[in-house]
């Protein structure tokens, strides 16, 4: 169970991490008064909080009003049969666990109640020890069911308890978010923002708005305010001289208010995602709702902003990973990739650096998507071999470590991501675009060193927290692979489809994107009867929505000019020591690394690159130094799961395979991701900017 307090964890014994008998609320339903009253007395003496009733209709009302943890239900009663009561209970409170008791047992009735999701089926009269052990097990299952169903419960003993709430339901944070949004919305627009939105494009490389997302598409003489009004279809209706209704473009001041709305949305989204104030999916919807209500874009444009290629990519990868696991191919892939990891130490210090290097040339998103499911199998096998039910620290270490090292593969080569292509394009505008080999010369040495630093961090932080002390990853993967025997025809076909998808990612993503190939893979898996449509329903749609909202937010920040204003303000606020040379490299990397946790890496580089690269030329700093600093640090998106598809994919797959419990939390990304990001800055500055960059020169 999670180390943090959340609604699913209320009522847990802190030492055993399971419900204590004295905190288990029990409802006993039986029409035999003497039997029911005797059983209620015995269970009360054992510490359970017992309610009892002989009326099945009354039982349904009690469940609706009090939400017990466990219902012990007689099957044969007047008015309503036990199966009917069970059906109604599950409609009202699906997390409540129901134990069926009957003296008229049969295979047919057991099958019927099984279809209705009864926790257990016991013969009446039942041995008290057997019943209490079943009740305890049912109470534990209720905790997992609450996590799966996102049911939250908190005892509101005071106004502070209510404000603090519980995980995914924090009224205090919601109120704070609404207050901050209101302040940003109603405050007068800063003069610097209004002036920036009114600057006209001249076409010169030194244009102060050269970093605007639509700069290349703007006509000479256009301002950001005018261009935004035209492309976002935002206008104001006024009465013309002849009394007719006319539409005019937004003024810079009116556009500035839209930018302030986007800044408010950014604050709310970051606050809610970091604190778990709302479930992920609902926060994702809230981003779109605010963009609709405050008229940032037209309705169709808002929907378009959500439907980015990266969103289809995440959806497709998650669905494809379901199909790969269904055939058993994930075990073969795991054996290929994890075959050398015979201990936790080997996994950290041998496998992780190899993964980081691989992520410099292949899609890090795909690598995480294919490795994470196998690591969850390793986790499940590890805890079962150790005789324990949960080891969240092990799950966090396994999942976050691959996620973070894959992120750090970005600087390794131009092939590591679209952000690198964006920076090469910016440098090409100044006639100094680096070659593939030149990029690697400055970026690749950072990758294995940073991977070893990440491995050391997880080794030092988790070595005492992990309950599973011996974990032969390679052996577990090999055993899992041997369990399913030789490869089948469907596995070979799945492997062929996967190879095709990876090939298209590597050589055709510039034309058909990252989403196109994986959607093609899904269609092919359906044609060859590897996957059914219901398999796609198994993916974490809340994570897909989350990344869609992150993309929409990035578009809103960029198109309204809010992102450029933030970047411009940062650069102008730099002290003299950070406005040139290595200081400018440090400042560029710092701001890029922070901003990329809230915007996509490509959008961040697009906004900052056209500002920092000209500054390099003006100050006499080599453009490569500042350009590389900006591009490399856009890989430091470790703190929030919206920072990169890697994070979103890893989060969605980090669930207990038996209980469905979310093992890696949002707070884990914030806590450990912040530390890894700080370490990345330290390594990049000491090993890169002030280290081997000085040695090899520019």
Image (spheres, grey):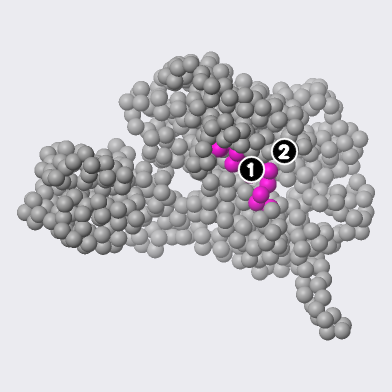
Residue 583 is at least partly visible in this image: no
Q: Secondary structure at mark 1?
A: helix
- Contact flag, marks 1 and 2 (Cβ < 8 Å): yes
Magenta includes 182?
A: no
Residue 55 visible in the current orientation: yes
Residue 658 screen position, x and y as percent: 38, 35
Q: Could you tell which of marks 1 and 2 lies nearer the N-terminus?
A: 1
Position of residue 562 measured from the top left corner of the image (x, y, whole percent): 73, 56
At x 18%, y 61%, the residue is 79
> Alpha carbon of mark 1 to alpha carbon of mark 2: how far?
10 Å
Of residues 16 and 481, which is closer to you in this image? Answer: 481
Residue closest to the far bottom: 243
On-image quarter of the C terminus: top right
Magenta residues? 305-319
Q: Residue 312 bears which disc, if any?
A: 1
- The residue where tag 2 is placed is 513
Measured along the vertical axis of the image, is residue 538 above or below residue 446? Answer: below
Taking 579 as reference, is 336 left or right?
Answer: left
Q: Is residue 306 left or right of residue 374?
A: right
- Density class for disc 1 (Cα within 10 Å; few <14, some 14-19, many ≥20) is many
Mark 2 Cα within 10 Å, few/some/many (few <14, many 20+)?
some
Q: Please state which of residues 32 and 633 is positioned toward the viewer in this rendering.
A: 32
Q: Identify the residue shown where x is 73% and y is 45%.
A: 603
Residue drawn at point x = 11 percent, y = 49 percent? 39
Q: At 62% across and 28% down in the image, what residue appears?
A: 497
């Amino acid at each position: 169970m999670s180390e943090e307090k959340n609604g699913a964890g209320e009522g847990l014994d802190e030492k055993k991490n399971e419900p204590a008998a004295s905190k288990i609320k029990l409802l006993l339903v039986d029409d035999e008064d003497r039997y029911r009253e005797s059983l209620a007395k015995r269970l009360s003496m054992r510490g359970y909080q017992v309610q009892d009733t002989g009326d099945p209709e009354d039982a349904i009302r009690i469940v609706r009003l009090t939400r017990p943890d466990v219902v012990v239900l007689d099957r044969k009663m007047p008015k309503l049969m036990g199966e009917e009561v069970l059906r109604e209970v599950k409609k009202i409170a699906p997390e409540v666990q129901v134990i069926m008791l009957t003296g008229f047992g049969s295979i047919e009735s057991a099958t019927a109640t099984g279809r209705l999701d009864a926790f257990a089926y016991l013969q009446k009269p039942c041995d008290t020890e057997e019943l209490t052990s079943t009740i305890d097990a049912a109470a534990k299952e209720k905790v997992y069911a609450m996590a799966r169903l996102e049911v939250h419960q908190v005892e509101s003993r005071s106004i502070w308890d209510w404000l603090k709430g519980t995980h995914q339901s924090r009224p205090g944070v919601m109120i704070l978010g609404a207050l901050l949004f209101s302040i940003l919305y109603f405050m007068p627009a800063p003069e610097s923002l209004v002036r920036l939105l009114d600057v006209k494009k001249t076409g010169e490389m030194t244009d102060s708005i050269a970093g605007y997302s639509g700069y290349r598409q703007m006509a000479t003489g256009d301002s950001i305010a005018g261009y935004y009004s035209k492309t976002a279809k935002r206008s104001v209706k006024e009465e013309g001289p002849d009394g007719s209704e006319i539409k005019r473009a937004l003024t810079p001041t009116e556009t500035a208010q839209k930018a302030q709305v986007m800044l408010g949305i950014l604050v709310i989204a970051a606050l809610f995602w970091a604190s778990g104030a709302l479930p992920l999916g609902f926060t994702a919807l809230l981003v779109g709702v605010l963009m609709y209500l405050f008229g940032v874009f037209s309705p169709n444009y808002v929907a378009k902003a959500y439907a980015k290629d990266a969103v289809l990519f995440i959806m497709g990868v998650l669905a494809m990973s379901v199909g790969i696991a269904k055939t058993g191919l994930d075990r073969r892939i795991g054996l290929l990739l994890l075959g050398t990891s015979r201990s936790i130490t080997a996994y950290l210090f041998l496998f992780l650096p190899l993964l980081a290097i691989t992520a410099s040339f292949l899609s890090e998103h795909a690598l995480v998507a294919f490795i994470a499911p196998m690591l969850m199998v390793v986790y499940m096998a590890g805890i079962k071999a150790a005789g324990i039910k949960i080891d969240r620290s092990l799950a966090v270490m396994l999942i976050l470590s691959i996620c973070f090292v894959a992120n750090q593969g970005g600087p390794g080569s131009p092939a590591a991501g679209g952000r690198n292509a964006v920076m090469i394009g910016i440098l090409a505008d100044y006639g100094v675009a680096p070659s593939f080999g030149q990029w690697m010369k400055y970026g690749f040495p950072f990758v294995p060193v940073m991977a070893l630093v990440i491995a050391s961090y997880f080794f030092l932080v988790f070595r005492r927290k992990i309950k599973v002390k011996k974990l032969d990853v390679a052996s577990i993967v090999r055993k899992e692979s041997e369990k399913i025997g030789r490869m089948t025809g469907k596995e070979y076909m799945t492997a062929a489809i996967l190879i095709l998808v990876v090939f298209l990612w590597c050589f055709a993503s510039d034309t058909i994107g990252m989403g196109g190939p994986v959607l093609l893979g899904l269609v092919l898996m359906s044609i060859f009867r590897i996957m059914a449509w219901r398999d796609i329903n198994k993916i974490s749609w809340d994570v897909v929505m989350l990344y869609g909202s992150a993309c929409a937010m990035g578009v809103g920040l960029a198109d309204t000019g809010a992102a450029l204003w933030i970047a411009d303000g940062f650069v102008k606020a730099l002290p003299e020591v950070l406005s040139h040379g290595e200081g400018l490299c440090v400042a560029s990397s710092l701001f890029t690394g922070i901003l990329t946790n809230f915007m996509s890496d490509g959008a961040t580089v697009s906004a900052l690159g056209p500002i920092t690269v000209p500054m390099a030329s003006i100050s006499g700093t080599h453009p490569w130094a500042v350009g590389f600093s900006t591009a490399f640090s856009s890989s430091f998106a470790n703190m929030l799961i919206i920072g990169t598809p890697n994070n979103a994919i890893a989060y969605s797959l980090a669930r207990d395979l038996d209980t469905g419990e979310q093992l890696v939390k949002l707070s884990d990304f914030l806590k450990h991701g912040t530390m890894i990001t700080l370490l990345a800055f330290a390594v990049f500055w000491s090993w890169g900017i002030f280290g081997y960059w000085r040695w090899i020169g520019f």
